[in-house]
Image (cartoon, rainbow, N blue to C red):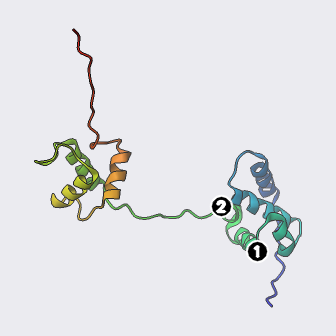
Amino acid sequence: MRIYRRLRVRLPKRHRDKIDRLLHGGIQPVRVVLRALALRQLHEGKAASQVAPTVHLTSKAVRDIGRRYEEKGLGGALYDKDRPGAAPLLDVGERQRIIAMVCGEPPVGFARWSVRLVAEEAVKRKLAPKVGRETIRILLQHHDFKPWREKNVVYAGTR
């Protein structure tokens, strides 16, 4: 059995006010609200094991929130760190060259560009070292291009 030292969280008035505004001020992510409630109860002198069932978190999670408050302050306790995400597969120049290629005529033998054709041609023309169809689809979607659609417009003739 592991024994934890009692976590003593003391919130200054400005942090208590900020938590109150957060809890009474509109829509917030559930995680943030639960963490704010846990901090408020820890400030009232309750143990992590008492706070945990009331905010539907584990005792460990409540202790982690208290420790993060001690180490990183209110923002560190309430909010998650930004996650970096994946690096872009194409740099700005490669994206621009691919868009310029799609704005031009499709290769000989093709009536229009398709996502697969754009991906193949981009690699063949050495615009990008390696590119997949999904990357091309998202690139075209961000630029609102739909080169595979042919506009079939029928105009009523005047007689």
When asked about the image quadrant of residue 37, the answer is bottom right
Q: Which residue is drawn at 27% across and 44% down?
A: 148
Name the image quarter holding the N terminus. bottom right
Callout 1: 10 Å neighbours few (<14), some, many (20+)? Answer: many
Seen in the picture, residue 23 relative to 111 is either above or below; the reply is below
Q: What residue type is labelled 1?
A: Arg
Q: Residue at x 73, y 71 (%)?
A: 70
> Circles 2 and 1: CB distance less than 8 Å?
no
Callout 2: 10 Å neighbours few (<14), some, many (20+)? Answer: some
Q: What residue type is labelled 2?
A: Tyr
Q: How far apart are marks 2 and 1 (CA)?
A: 15 Å
Furthest residue toward top: 159
Furthest residue toward right: 45
Q: Earlier in the sequence, mark 2 or mark 1?
A: 1
Name the image quarter holding the C terminus. top left
Residue 11 seen anywhere in this rendered image of the structure: no
Q: Where is residue 77 in the image (x, y as percent from the top left)?
A: 70, 65
Q: Position of residue 8 (x, y in %)?
A: 83, 73
Is 145 displayed left or right of 42 in the figure?
left
Looking at this view, is 17 or 133 the one in front? 133
Q: Residue at x 26, y 37 (%)?
A: 150
Task: Give SS at disc 1.
Answer: helix
Looking at this view, is 144 or 91 the one in front? 144
According to the picture, the residue beneath numbered tag 2 turns out to be 79
According to the picture, the residue beneath numbered tag 1 turns out to be 63
